[in-house]
Image: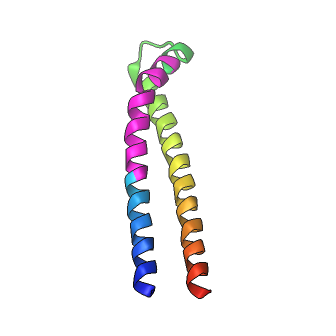
Amino acid sequence: MADSAAFKVQLLETFASLITAAFGLVAALAWNDTIKAAVKLAFPTDDGLVGMVIYAVIVTILAVIMTLLIARSLNKAKEALHLEKKE
């Protein structure tokens, strides 16, 4: 029974890592042009570096938030599995 719970936890951790990586890639691709266009509208400068830095900060913040949400969900799933194990 313990091996089954350990396998479930390992499987959930692996899926969480894959989902996080996939989300990062999909989100970056989906929002790439939109965020760049919004930054250009908000900060119309000739210096492309300013826009690139703002863009990188926005994408990083989104990635961190989603990673934290996924990690929180994983922890809740682990807690539920441990509760099942004790019963």
Front residue of this view, candidates 74 and 54: 74
**In the rendered structure, which segment of residues is drawn in magenta?**
19-38
Above or below, comparing residue 31 to residue 17 in the picture = above
Determine the residue positioned at 49% across, 30% down. Answer: 54
Left or right relative to 48: residue 58 = right
Determine the residue positioned at 53% across, 42% down. Answer: 61
Left or right relative to 23: residue 86 = right
Is 87 covered by the magenta stretch? no
Above or below, comparing residue 11 to residue 40 in the picture = below
Above or below, comparing residue 79 to residue 70 in the picture = below
Is 23 covered by the magenta stretch? yes
Q: What colouring method underlies this structural image?
A: rainbow
Front residue of this view, candidates 48 and 65: 65
Determine the residue positioned at 48% across, 44% down. Answer: 63
Q: Main secondary structure of the magenta part?
A: helix
Q: Looking at the rendering, in which quadrant would you find the N terminus? A: bottom left
Picture coordinates of residue 18, whole percent (x, y):
37, 54
Picture coordinates of residue 85, whole percent (x, y):
55, 84
Picture coordinates of residue 11, whole percent (x, y):
39, 67
Front residue of this view, candidates 77 and 47: 77
Determine the residue positioned at 57% across, 60% down. Answer: 73
